[in-house]
Amino acid sequence: MSTAAPPVLDAGFVARALGGALRERRGPDAAFMRAVIDSRLVEPGDLFVALQGERSDGHRHAAAAVAAGARGCLLARAVPGTESAACFFTDDPLAALQRLAVAWRDALPGLEVVGVTGSVGKTTTKNIAAALLAARRRVQATPLNYNNEIGVPLCLLELRPGTERAVIEHAMYTTGEIALLCTWTRPRIGIVLSVGPVHLERAGSLEAIVRAKRELVEALPAEGHAALNADDPNVRGMASHTRARVWLYGSAADAEVRASDAESHGAAGFAFTLHALGESRRLRVALPGVHLVSNVLGAATAAFADGLHFDEVARAIETLDVAPRLRVARLGGGVTLIDDTYNAQPASMRAALELLAEMPGRRLALLGDMRELGAESVPAHAEVGRQAAAVLDALFTVGEFAAGIAESARANGLEPVEHLRGKERAAAALLATLRAGDVVLVKGSHALGLESVIAELERALGVAP
């Protein structure tokens, strides 16, 4: 058993990690808890990294970060008000952040990474996987969606010595990005969820997105494990592109980790029968939306691949207490709200409408644009309209592309349907229509800012205890 002292993320470690990229070091020695790039999120003991973007420059907030308790700053130039902190000067703070994160990941003994990728559900699956693995391992997973060239280094720098498993999202806009992230994280287990036309405008084609997501399993070592969604042909096809041991999960008959007889209980969750490792058990999950059974299976597969027993995983599934992105709230006046405003793309729209269909009462929705779908945008919005017509009693839409949802829903027989010119009228339109016993879904791309509509509804109706 090793008696080596655990590594310390201190000024000396930062200087050694940056090596030739460190232009100058000033200030006292200090130890850091983590790295942050937003001065508003600084806690005592943080290392503030001043990133320079097209519209913002972190150097303008460095002094505020130090005033909030940051013990150090990673900077490209000197900033008044930071003299009391340990300051590290480099030509490229982002590249330095990435270099520091890789050095810290390499310094943590016994750490193994579980990588998660897919077009929808990464954060929820990450949280579920962390909860299941915690039945036996010491696990860390940031509650935030740190999943790109900035977020993944921040995630790595949050890891503490003694952590055995880190569950980390790996996202992409185009090919090559996940491969780069994997050189930093070095995952041993990879979970691939479904793959759809998200970021199609940037990636160019669904085939390019598949290739980009496949980079996670291509990076796995021969002694690693790839958990692949057997119900998605694009993901199933990744089995021939990895050296790792392949585990198929899903509802398919040949899935090694399989779900059957899934049954929705609406906002109260769902039940299904889990089949794995030669055993079967009926399980109840307290997460809203039976579509989440696939996320649970992907996480469970990672846990089985990591050596957990069937009983350990089954018990952990039944006691899951993770917050999915989708939120169900009871408002005053007997109204139920489904808040799914974080983002929107075809698969998540379908899942949200399916959950709405499982809820009792009159069903209404405010649906907004799905962005970055490229050539798929028109047919994708029309398909959501068709799905909405089969579920809803009334529909409101907002956004340039969502007009296609309204047009399609009306063509498929739904009335009333109203396309709003802006979100400013959305809450008033909903409030004028809602009555006791109704359930309303609000969903659209994050860029629309529909969370302001949620806030207006909650102010007007109140949130029931």
Image (spheres, helix red, strand yellow):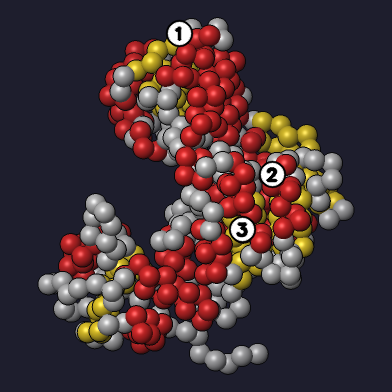
- Residue 451: percent from left, percent from top: 36, 35
Q: 193 and 291: which one is in front?
A: 193
Residue 132 seen in the figure? no
| Residue in the image at 56% along x and 41% along y | 205
**Which amino acid does the dot numbered 1 rest on?**
Pro
Residue 234, numbered circle: 2
Residue 215, numbered circle: 3
First-in-chain label (3 vs 1): 3
Would you say 192 lies left or right of 92 here?
right
Secondary element under disc 1, as helix, strand or loop, is loop
Crowd band around label 2 with a 10 angstrom C-alpha radius: few (<14), some (14–19), many (20+)? many
Secondary element under disc 2, as helix, strand or loop, is helix
Residue 213 seen in the figure? yes
| Residue in the image at 56% along x and 62% along y | 179
Residue 416, numbered circle: 1
Would you say 159 lies left or right of 90 here?
right
